[in-house]
Structure formats: structure tokens, C-alpha cells
Image: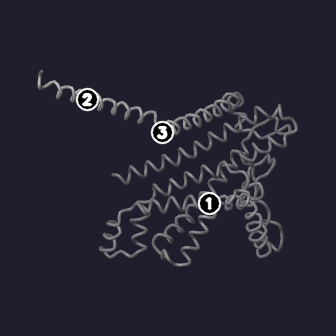
Amino acid sequence: MNPSAPSSSNAEIVAAAREALAQKSRWTKWFSPLPFLTGFLTLCVVAMLAVILWNIVTHGIGRLTWEFLTGVPSQGMTEGGIFPAIFGTVFLVILMTIAVIPLGVATAIYLRYYARPDAWSSRLVRVAVNNLAGVPAIVFGLFGLGFFIQFVGQGMDNLFFGGQLTFGQPAILWASLTMALLTLPVVIVATEEAMRAIPNDYLEASYALGATRWQTIARVILPNSLTGILTGGILAVSRGAGEVAPIMFTGAAYFLPYLPHRLNDQFMELGYHVYVMSTQSPDVEATLPILYSTVLVLLLLTFALNALAVLIRYRLRGRQAV
């Protein structure tokens, strides 16, 4: 009997066991329940999104002409174009961004560098921000109607215009401020996260050179947080361009054949225009092609605004890297 035979048999058994464990590990890696379920659900969501986009593009691309983009609605919104709604949407988003970015950045600076974490004022602000993020959009519309229009607007009319109705009515100014409140938590959280990511060495070096806290914030913190601030701005634009409920009470109009040229003018908006055509049209079948094209324009406009903000962010990031 060969004394090396048992040792060779054991080695084969060990090798077979290792191979079986390796196969089981590969099987577990690729076909374990949780990753497989997650991947399957992700594919389902992507497939549904692709079907929706394909449906919108195929039904809306045929009506997408220059006359449609530059004309005004006519024939009970079954003919004509959507230029007043495009202009109103862009105007609304620009005013909202101008209002929400400074307020959100100032709040983030206060929470990060001025307020004590255990102070009642900082806890109050954080609770307010968290609650704002969970409030339904329709509530913001009712708040804008009550506070901006009936309180601030009518107060301005009584003080500066002798009671004449000027600002105490739905207008693009009040709709923009209401949308700014709606998107404010997004900007605050994104800005504070960007400031938290700045190394403490930067602050200590600035203080060691004799800079004050405000000089450090203005010359060190804010320049290094610009990409995070723009990220919050992108998210705010994405939400602001698609929300309808807040502007129903504060400034959006059913039909306007002219463009808003003052802050106290009403305006048309693409999302509200889609809502009106889908619920108030006298002829649903005749409105359907325009409805698809308007949704397609709204999606393209949102993507374009996001792409512009992303381009600005990458250019600033490249400049900081240099």
C-alpha cells in the first residue's frame, strides 16, 4: 500500500470543497435575493420611465413646430401655441432662484457658523426646515394666498397706493416667493452639506492669518461651497419648474394672450397649462396633441435649465481645481 495515497485523497477532498464554496460564493454574489430584487425593481422603474417618455415623445413631436413654440393659445386652447406659458415658466424659475439662493445660503451660514447647536433658536430653525420639507405643496399655495397676497400685498396697497388694488392680487412675484419657500429646505440642506465638507484646516489657516469669521466665510467658505450651492439650485429648479399646486392660488392664469412685464402681473405656466387643458378643455380629443407637445416642452425646458446649472457648476469646479 502506498503511504502517500491517503494524503492525496485528502487534498482532492479539500480542493473539491474549496471549489464548491467558490461556486456557492459566486452564486450568492450574483443571485442572492436582495441584490437580485433591487436590480429587478430598478429595471422595472427604468422600463416604466422609458415607456412614459417614449409615449410623450412619439405623440408630442409631431406638433412641435416653430409656430407652436412662438404662438399664443387660440380656439379654446385647441389651436395656437404656448409661448406665454414658456415665458411665464422661465420668468417664474428665475425669480424663484433669485429669492431662494440668498435666503437658503444665509440660513445655512447661520446654522453652521453662528448658531450654537444647543440654542433654542437654532433648534427652532432646524425644526422649521424639517417641517417645511414635509408640507404638501397645496398648503404652500394657501399660505402664499393668505400671507403674501392678503397680508403683504394688501398692506402695500394701503400704504403706498391709497388702497388701489396693485399688489394685493395674484401675481408672478407672489408665486415666485411661494415657490422659493417650497424649495428653501433643499437649498439649505445642500449648502450646509457643502460647508460641512470643507476641511477644518482651511478655517484654521484663515484664522491664523488674522481673518475674522465673516472674512473667512466670504473668502474661504463660500468660494469652496459654490458647487454644493449650485447643486441645491439645480434641485430647486427641477422641483420649481414642475410644481402646479402652489401657483394655482398665487399667480397662474387660465389664459393670457400677452406676456407678464411687471412683477404684479399674472402669468401662464406650462405645468398649470397642462392641468387646464387636461381638465377644462371643451374638446378633449382636439386638445390631446397640444397636451402631449406641451408636456414634451415642459420636460425639455426642465432638462435645459438643469443642464445650464450643471454646466455652470462644472466650470466653477474646474476653475477651483486650477
Kind of residue at badge 3? Pro
Does the CB distance between marks 3 and 2 fall below 8 Å? no
What element does badge 1 sit on?
helix
Disc 1 marks which amino acid? Ala
Crowding near pointer 1: few (<14 within 10 Å), some, many (20+)? some
Q: Earlier in the sequence, mark 3 or mark 1?
A: 3
On screen, residue 306 versus residue 155, left or right, reads: left
Q: Is 80 located above or below residue 188 in the figure?
A: above
Residue under circle 3?
35
Earlier residue among tags 3 and 2: 2
Who's the residue at 61% across and 68% down the image? 128
Q: Which residue is mark 2?
A: 15
On the image, the x and y values in percent for residue 172 come to 72, 57
Q: Quadrant of the N terminus?
A: top left
Question: Considering depth in this image, is 243 or 4 the residue closer to the camera?
Answer: 4
Residue with the mark numbered 1: 133
Give the spatial CA distance, label 1 vs label 2.
57 Å
**Left of 206 or right of it: where is 171?**
right
Label 3 – label 1 distance at C-alpha: 30 Å
